[in-house]
Image: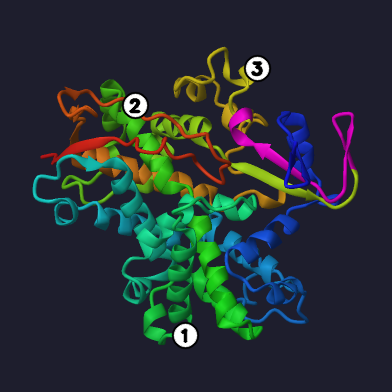
């Protein structure tokens, strides 16, 4: 297909996708990333410096045996992300803070503070967005980022709604809030970077090391702010949307809700204030199956590579200078792997065939050099979020007023929006949501 004079090759075969992820010679992830840098606010004049390999490796813990020297600034940031987010002591420290933030934000009194004493007719989209974007952003940057910009969650959500236009060079729709939101976030990070040490006191190891590396290389504050936005975006792009869909599927199936409550009960303290994340990971196969199945259905991500040298594939020659896109949704709906009705929500498929989650037909986090290092944290975050919600609260899905204002009718299950290219989990169609009445469980 041709878009704006550029040829785009759409690849859906699991075998070809595997070959793409293994090819770091004629296919380039860096070239895709380079385009993102400018879209997120890095000045074009600054990008060559970010890709240049340094003589030393300032700002990185050289005592760590897994540290890599001689990397460009961009590759060292990617390496730092792996060292923070792959299993190990740093992962444990990060996840402990994240779980604590989710526990705090889902306290009953916090919900009442936001939604009123009765906590009735609240938007599930809003609940998931506010809790998960706040928790993740706070874990990365500490409380100080909210002192700099109290509305950073709202600005992020406005930005992310149309962020796909930056990647696909698509004109922004009239009324898009992207540019204003990006400016607000960049200003916040500018003040964060240039502010006092106290503002950054509780930031994550990742943010501390990234800023150390960038400042040691004399990167301008404006470009540091843009790179911090990219980190924040990468961490936040999926969880709040995935949380929405997991809760929607669970709440529209009362028997599944009760099954998951029974399975996860052992992870919850007697007063419901604390959650054991390790228990959820190791002892809750049905909750994991729901997580995997929801990702399979709603993940509309398009993974990409730039072709730097003519590349043979599938009996064709993919020409230099063009782009390859891998649509996860088509891959995840193949009947050969997922049966005759892959469009249906059936978590049991991952329980009956435990090899599915590691097969070439299921790639929710991509692969190869761009294999998402946050995949372990994402799973833990979703299991924790859902387990806290279903164990702390009771839910009702009340009838809503019809468009003509004359009758109340049951809410319909939201439909997936596939109308635009996606960089992450798809949101529901515009105007669709799930409205809930919530009560504290005794």
- As drawn, the label of residue 413 is 2
Q: Which residue is mark 3?
A: 336
Mark 1 or mark 2: which comes first in sequence? 1
Look at the image and tell me in which quarter the N terminus lies.
Answer: top right
Report which quarter residue 318 is drawn in: top right
Q: Nearer the viewer, mark 1 or mark 2?
A: 2
Element type where label 3 sits in the image = helix
- As drawn, the label of residue 184 is none
| Closer-to-camera residue (432/304) | 432
Q: Nearer the viewer, mark 3 or mark 2?
A: 2
Q: Does any portion of residue 367 appear in the rendered image?
A: no
Boundaries of the magenta span: 311-330
Element type where label 2 sits in the image = loop
- As drawn, the label of residue 194 is 1
- Image height of 442 relative to 115, above or below: above
- The residue at the far top in this view is 340
Q: Position of residue 404 (x, y in %)?
A: 21, 27
Asked if the residue at tag 2 contacts the one at tag 3, i.e. Cβ–Cβ closer than 8 Å, the answer is: no
3D distance between C-alphas at marks 1 and 2: 46 Å
Q: Residue at x 56, y 43 (%)?
A: 422
Mark 1 or mark 3: which comes first in sequence? 1
Number of numbered tags placed on the structure image: 3
Q: Nearer the viewer, mark 1 or mark 3?
A: 1
| Closer-to-camera residue (277/138) | 138
Mark 3 crowd level (few <14, some 14–19, many ≥20, 10 Å Cα): few
Element type where label 1 sits in the image = helix
3D distance between C-alphas at marks 1 and 3: 54 Å
- Image height of 32 relative to 379, above or below: below
In this rendering, position of residue 232 left or right of residue 148: right
Q: Residue at x 16, y 47 (%)?
A: 271
- Image height of 197 relative to 357, above or below: below
């Amino acid at each position: 297909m041709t878009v704006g004079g550029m040829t785009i090759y759409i690849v859906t075969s699991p075998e070809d996708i595997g070959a793409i992820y293994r090819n770091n010679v004629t296919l380039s992830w860096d070239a895709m990333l380079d385009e993102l840098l400018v879209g997120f606010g890095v000045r074009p004049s600054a990008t060559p410096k970010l890709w240049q390999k340094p003589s030393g490796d300032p700002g990185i813990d050289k005592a760590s045996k897994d540290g890599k020297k001689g990397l460009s600034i961009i590759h060292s940031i990617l390496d730092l992300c792996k060292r923070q987010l792959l299993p190990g002591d740093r992962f444990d420290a990060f996840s402990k803070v994240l779980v604590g933030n989710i526990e705090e934000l889902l306290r009953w009194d916090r919900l009442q503070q936001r939604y009123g004493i009765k906590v009735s007719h609240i938007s599930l989209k809003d609940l998931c967005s506010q809790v998960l974007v706040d928790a993740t952003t706070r874990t990365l940057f500490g409380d100080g980022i909210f002192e700099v910009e109290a509305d950073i969650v709202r600005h992020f959500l406005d930005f992310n709604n149309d962020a796909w236009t930056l990647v696909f060079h698509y004109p922004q729709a009239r009324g898009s809030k992207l540019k204003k939101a990006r400016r607000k976030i960049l200003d916040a990070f500018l003040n964060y970077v240039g502010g006092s040490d106290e503002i950054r006191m509780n930031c994550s190891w990742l943010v501390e090391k990234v800023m150390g590396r960038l400042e040691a290389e004399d990167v301008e504050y404006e470009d540091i702010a843009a790179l911090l936005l990219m980190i924040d975006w990468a961490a936040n792009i999926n969880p709040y949307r995935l949380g929405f869909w997991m809760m929607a599927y669970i709440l529209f199936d009362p028997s599944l809700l009760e099954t998951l409550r029974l399975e996860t009960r052992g992870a919850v303290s007697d007063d419901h204030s604390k959650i054991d994340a390790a228990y959820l990971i190791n002892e809750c196969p049905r909750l994991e199956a729901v997580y995997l199945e929801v990702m399979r259905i709603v993940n509309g991500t398009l993974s990409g590579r730039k072709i730097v040298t003519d590349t043979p594939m599938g009996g064709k020659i993919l020409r230099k200078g063009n782009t390859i896109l891998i649509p996860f949704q088509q891959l995840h709906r193949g009947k050969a792997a997922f049966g005759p009705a892959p469009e249906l929500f059936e978590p049991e498929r991952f329980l009956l065939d435990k090899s599915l989650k590691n097969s070439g037909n299921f790639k929710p986090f991509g692969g190869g050099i761009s294999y998402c290092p946050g995949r372990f944290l994402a799973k833990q975050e979703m299991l924790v979020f859902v387990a806290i919600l279903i164990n702390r609260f009771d839910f009702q899905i009340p009838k809503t007023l019809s468009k003509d204002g004359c009758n109340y009718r049951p809410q319909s299950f939201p439909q997936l929006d596939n109308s635009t290219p996606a960089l992450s989990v798809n949101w529901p169609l515009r105007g669709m949501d799930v409205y809930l009445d919530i009560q504290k469980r005794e």
